Image (spheres, coloured by chain):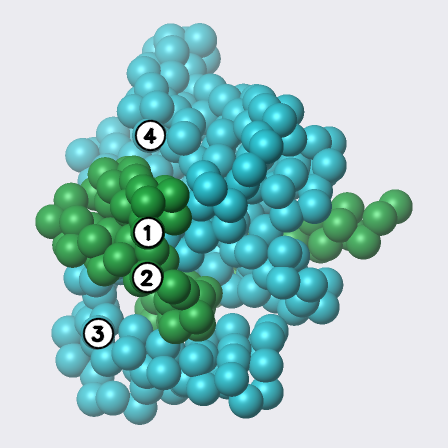
Chain colours: A cyan, B green
Amino acid sequence: MSFSQEFARGMRKSPPVVLSSAPFGLLFGALAVDNGFTVGEAVLMSAAVYAGASQMVGLDLFGQKVAPWLIALSIFAVNFRHVLYSAAVGRRVPHWAPAQRAFGFFFLVDPQYAEAERKAENGENVTFAWFMGMATPIYLFWVAEAWIGASFGSLIPNTYALGLDFLLPIYFLGLVMSFRLRPLWLPIVLTSAVASIVAYETIGSPWHVTVGAIAGMALAAFMPVNGNGNGEDAA
Amino acid sequence: MTTTVWIILASAVLTYLSRIGGHLVLSRFDRIHPRVEASLNAVPAAVLTTLVAPAAYHGGPAEIAAMIVAAIVGWHSGLMTMFVIGAAVLIAGRNLL
């Protein structure tokens, strides 16, 4: 099959992802401006980081005036799951040139990973053209949405009445719940919740993030290991 | 360049490293220690919880109500439905309570 045919086949995988991520792409732009970003900075973040949940985490901490290195570290922590995606997809694409891997893996967001794995499990060849066909529309829309959201976000008069400052915690709650099929989910969440509230009240922000995350990870590491931990996530 | 731009660029580099790093580094190991894998599996829920819990703890009636409704809705449906209903409860609460 030619490059353009494969690219077109990949593109057909993109509309559900584009549609379901659009509200969050727009919201990111609006919240970025609300948290002190310029329109250009909002667009730069969507274009350069290209990882929705972690971009929201960055905004949330930015609004709390957290130290810059800790913001970058928290974004890295949220994105650390990509290490596992990249190891998995890497095994599916031995036929890609090194430059194709270096370029293509930039676009390895959650749905891109899921579709590539599904295609490989069906015994189909994950071609670079197919992969980029799926990635290109998702990426372009994501960046455009940051620009639209930021441009219109600065026009919103009363952000408190619209609840803009509290939308991120609700969104993060949804992300937390999307991992609920993983082993030890409830004990980890409860441990991190208590540890982060105690740290927030005693040492203060931003250390509640580090302390709460380490508490949850330590619990997971020290509990008896059962199952293979490969449970499919709910979202 | 502003601090914001530096934060964005550092985050972009770290995010890219996580996307290429698993392929370059992790694939060289035959197996990961189960306890290391368990703690890595815990990372997203643990980190994201720390961004929810103190905010909920300091929330007023509108914020608490939005969180509770969102959690109940989220248990039965997807992220989008949960987010929209949670936001609706929050906005209603802030404007009516």
Determine contact: label 1, label 2, CB under 8 Å.
yes
Instruction: Determine which residue is flagged by label 4.
Output: A20
Could you say which is closer to the camera, residue B92 or residue A203? B92
Q: Amino acid at mark 3?
A: Leu
Numbered marks: total:
4
Could you say which is closer to the camera, residue A110 or residue A23? A23
Q: Position of residue A14 (x, y in %)?
A: 36, 22
Q: Amino acid at mark 1?
A: Leu
Instruction: Determine which residue is flagged by label 1.
Output: B97
Q: Position of residue A223 (x, y in %)?
A: 25, 88
Residue A186: give its label. 3
Position of the N terminus of chain A by quadrant:
top left
| Residue displayed at 15% across by 44% down | B77
- Front of the two marks 4 and 1: 1
Q: Secondary structure at mark 2?
A: helix
State the image quarter where residue A71 is shown: bottom right
Determine contact: label 4, label 1, CB under 8 Å.
no
In the image, taking residue B72 as reference, residue A55 lies left or right, namely right
Looking at this rendering, what residue extends furthest in the left direction? B76
Q: Earlier in the sequence, mark 3 or mark 4?
A: 4
- Residue A81 vs A14, above or below: the answer is below
Output the chain of dot 3.
A
Residue B39 in view (yes/no): no
Q: Secondary structure at mark 4?
A: helix
Q: Position of residue A50 (x, y in %)?
A: 55, 40
| Label 3, label 1: how far apart the Cα atoms are | 32 Å
Q: Amino acid at mark 2?
A: Pro
| Label 4, label 2: how far apart the Cα atoms are | 30 Å
